[in-house]
Image (spheres, rainbow, N blue to C red):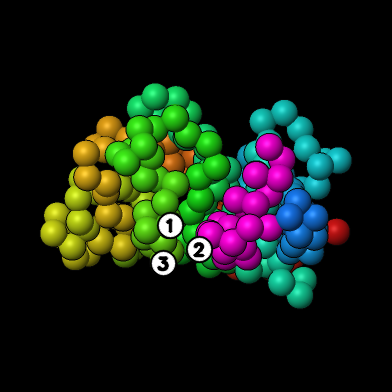
Amino acid sequence: MLIDKHRNILKSVGLVEQNRRYTAAEIESLYTKYIKPLWIDADGRLINESQRGEGDFPLYIYLKEENIEAYIVPINSRGLWGRIQGYLAIDNDGSTVAGFTVYKHSETPGLGGEIEKAWFQKNWVGKKIVDRGGGFVSVSIAKGAVEDLIPSEKQPNYVDGISGATLTGKYLTTGLKEALEAYEPVSIRFRKNQITEPPG
């Protein structure tokens, strides 16, 4: 299970390929090299495990040559038939989605279960969690094709929905917004360039 989580954290930032098989050792090697698990406090400050207190949230940092490329937020959302668990990666600009993955769900195969498929997850890359004015809005799942249903100024904040899976999209939209609202203090710090390197 831990390997699955690590694989999906890596996948959220494009460090593993969707259809390629990796050994547990390969996953752990990549995870150790590129991912730094941290916590954030209520003010959005990055802290180490030893400093964490009650009410702090886990966060994963994608490091490349000691530079923060992205940060990864755990998602634990209600679904139609059970919890949907995964990760949303956000670029170091604090606004742009870098990737989205799901590692556990109970949605119906061929319908809501499409959330685990590559076509759906690729939709998220480049989407914005803020509106044109820089205010937080999250990313929502449309009830069909974004370009057919959503006004152009709001399209950066939507991904294409899954046909026949309106409720899965609705629940996941709500769960994502709740998660990202909780992590908004750290996102604001990234947007203001107040975070450039992880704590020592």
Q: Is the residue marked by circle 2 packed among few (<14), some (14-19), or many (20+) residues within 10 Å?
A: many
Which secondary structure, mark 2? strand
- Which residue matches tag 2? 98
Q: In this view, does 169 lie above or below 31?
A: above
Residue contact at pointers 1 and 3, CB within 8 angstroms: no
Tell me where the magenta segment starts and ends, as one range: 1-22
Q: Which is more toward the observer, 132 or 30?
A: 30
The N terminus - image quarter: top right
- Which mark is on residue 118? 1
Residue type at mark 1? Answer: Ala
Residue type at tag 2: Ala
Q: Is mark 1 on a helix, strand or loop?
A: helix
Question: What is the distance, in whole Å, between disc 1 and disc 2 at their CAs?
Answer: 14 Å
Q: Which of marks 1 and 3 is nearer the N terminus?
A: 1
Q: Distance between the residues labelled 1 and 3?
A: 15 Å
Tell which circle, 1 or 2, labels the residue nearer the N-terminal end. 2
| x, y percent for residue 49 | 81, 42
Q: Which of 131 and 156 is in front in this view?
A: 156
Gap in angstroms between the C-alphas marked 3 and 2 = 6 Å
Residue found at the far bottom of this picture: 65
Numbered disc 3: secondary structure: loop
7 and 139: which one is in front? 7
Q: What residue type is labelled 3?
A: Gly
Q: Mark 3 points at which residue?
A: 126
> Which mark is first along the chain, 2 or 3?
2
Q: Where is residue 12 in the image (x, y as percent from the top left)?
A: 56, 57
Q: Residues within 10 Å of mark 1 (few under 14, many from 20)?
A: some
The question of residue 144 being in magenta is answered with no
Q: Is residue 104 above or below residue 93?
A: above
**Magenta span has 13?**
yes
Q: Is residue 157 visible?
A: yes
